[in-house]
Image (cartoon, rainbow, N blue to C red):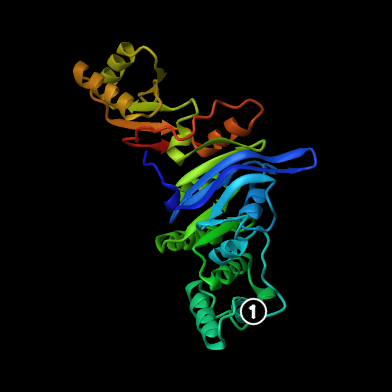
Amino acid sequence: MTTTTSHSLAIAAKRLRKAYGDKTVLDGIDLAVPAGTVFSLLGPNGAGKTTAVKILSTLITADAGELRVGGHDLAADPQAVRAAIGVTGQFSAVDGLITGEENMLLMADLHHLSRGEGRRTAAELLERFDLTEAAKKPASTYSGGMKRRLDLAMTLVGDPRIIFLDEPTTGLDPRSRHNMWQIIRELVSDGVTVFLTTQYLDEADELADRIAVLNDGKIAAEGSADELKRLIPGGHVRLRFTDPAAYQSAAVALREVTRDDEALALQIPSDGSQRELRAILDWLDSTGIEADELTVHTPDLDDVFFALTGPTTIPAQPNQPTQPNQSKENVR
């Protein structure tokens, strides 16, 4: 795994702590978000995701920790941090009493853009987010997806290089969610860093370069989606045969195997690593048995989430390198 230097981190937090009275919300967590990536923070309700976003975006102060955002020390220079970031929260900041265009121009004024530059920026962003036709209509008439797009467009008026998206697709229909995903991908392709909190595990799986699971104020595990999935037992390799004789030969020869006689399929416990997959292929070659289909099944993020945030959690193994799958099929 590539080591990331502090100079290439958009967000770096060490020993971040926050408590409200006797309730510790963030218990000395570390976060490292490389520039130009999507970092997703997962966790159950009340885990501290929104608190982390509020601290890193200067809305509230931490009790302790060394925090740098956009290369700036958050405690020493919060104004520089604010100039580098944009925040879109769970609840839209859109003013429904005015038009979409007026919302955009209001943000342009707040960023001290000239009248001409503000209008040009507003028009470009409204077009980019497919809101030009609705620009003259009151924002109260917009659908949920349109309001979220307008909210994000307003966030981009100041051209932030780091964007905090706190559950940005909550309540959206599937099409609107996918539209938002595409917008996020385009932002990252332009070099923007996205810090994403979400309760939709498929959203993190789809978008995030790295994922951290927050539970009881601590990081339970961190890694890519594939790395986290390999922490959970239940992975297996499935061999399917069309020749009953080959199926029977393989079933007899293999010891730890689950048979599916109707489908002529065998299930072999596996962590999905390249080493284990190669061993299975070598074994098939040495015995002269040919499977017609081989698929590697790994647990999905739902399994990871429940295992890490349930009453009993598996040991966390953050930042451990794993071998890539040759093929993968998630089973829900």
Local packing at callout 1 (Cα closer than 10 Å; few below 14, some 14-19, many 20+) is some
- Residue found 50% across the figure and 49% down from its top: 39
- Residue found 50% across the figure and 83% down from its top: 120
| In the depicted structure, whether residue 94 falls above or below residue 321 | below
Q: Is residue 249 visible?
A: yes
Towards the viewer: 132 or 124: 124
Q: Outermost residue toward the right?
A: 21
Towards the viewer: 87 or 68: 68
| Res 58 → quadrant | bottom right
Which quarter of the rendering shows the N terminus? Answer: top left
- Residue found 67% across the figure and 79% down from its top: 138
Count of numbered circles in the view: 1
| Residue type pointed to by label 1 | Leu
* Image coords of residue 25 (percent x, y): 70, 41
Under circle 1, the secondary element is: helix
What residue is pinned by disc 1?
A: 106
| In the depicted structure, whether residue 287 falls above or below residue 242 | above
| Res 86 → quadrant | bottom right
Towards the viewer: 265 or 234: 234
- Residue found 59% across the figure and 49% down from its top: 198
| Res 151 → quadrant | bottom right
Q: Outermost residue toward the bottom?
A: 116
On screen, residue 51 versus residue 164, left or right, reads right
* Image coords of residue 287 (percent x, y): 21, 16
Q: Is residue 169 visible?
A: no
Towards the viewer: 7 or 232: 7
* Image coords of residue 203 (percent x, y): 52, 50
* Image coords of residue 208 (percent x, y): 47, 49
Q: Outermost residue toward the front?
A: 76
